[in-house]
Image: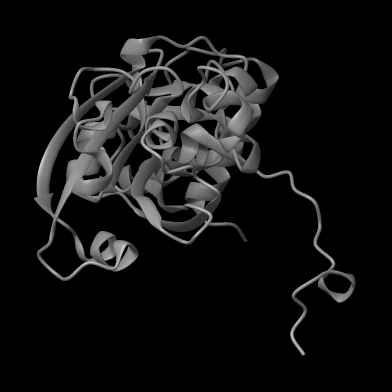
Amino acid sequence: MAPKWRELADRLADRIRSGAYSPGDRLPHIRDLVEAGEGSKSTVHAAYRALEAEGLVTSSRGHGTVVRQRPPLKRLGVSRYDKAEWRDGDEVAFIADRVASGRAHKRDDQTQTVKRVEAPPAAAAAHGLAPGSLVYARARVVREAGQPTHTLTSYYRPEHVEGTRLVDPVPGPAGRGGGFRVLYDAGYEIDRMREELFARVATPEESKLLMLAGGEPVVELHRTAYTADGTVVEFAIGVHAASRFTWSYDFEVPDSAHGEGRPA
């Protein structure tokens, strides 16, 4: 037998899918469902969290739980880093996601701060720096239709970015083609990327910044960008509201048995 919170979540999901709750409608307050006999406060809260994790609703402080008006943003994989877009055009990665999702975008969808800080352990390790080394941290908050979707903080060696737009805190992407184009113009063409994903519960600070309900999950992204000779020119940590994205990867399937570099 399913737990009570699951039964309630399924009933509410059926009402959303049938149109009884339309996009933009606010679901009843938790206390109202408790008073209606739908379960305890913890039961209703768990049901709402399940609906959010399933992408049916969004929750934020001051706005309650609202039926999602649009599908989650598509967070592209390999194609978001297409050199033809940022090297030869003017597109930046998060805008590529918006275009693929059929969404509008504005320069003020991204704000940032730039500081010279001690490298966090993960950034120091990625760049091959000693603990306590100074790096530039470019921290962004990205929004979609006014709602924060994710944060992204990029860490750079000072010698790679001093004198470039990457250390300029003016709001918005770092000019035409974004940060990757800035690095390219400085002589550091990105040739390879590594991304690692970690799912976890948001911290209280992240919940406040991203306007999440308490205990909502996030996806933490670690991105390392390399030049052709293996130099790390960016290490970035992103924190994404899990329910606001789908992660889309489209790539050729390797066949190492018939390619080069197969282990002996």
Q: Quadrant of the C terminus?
A: bottom right
Counting from the top left corner in percent of width and height, residue 201 is at 34, 54
x then y, percent, for residue 84:
63, 27
Q: Nearer the viewer, residue 138 or 197?
A: 138
Q: Is residue 111 visible?
A: yes
Q: Which image quadrant for residue 99?
A: top right
Relative vertical location of residue 67 with respect to residue 248 in this rendering, above or below: above
Q: Residue at x 52, y 20 (%)?
A: 91
Does 19 sit left or right of 115 as displayed? right
Give the residue drawn at x 36%, y 11%. 107
Q: Position of residue 101 (x, y in %)?
A: 61, 21
Residue drawn at point x = 67 percent, y = 45 percent: 249
| In-image side of 176 versus 209 (left or right) | right
Quadrant location of the N terminus in the rendered image: bottom right
Q: Nearer the viewer, residue 163 or 100?
A: 163
Numbered circles on residues, count: 0
The answer to which image quadrant residue 49 occupies is top left
Q: Residue furthest right?
A: 258
Find residue 37 and report its horizontal and vertical position in percent: 41, 36
In the rendered image, the vertical position of residue 89 relative to residue 57, given as above or below: above
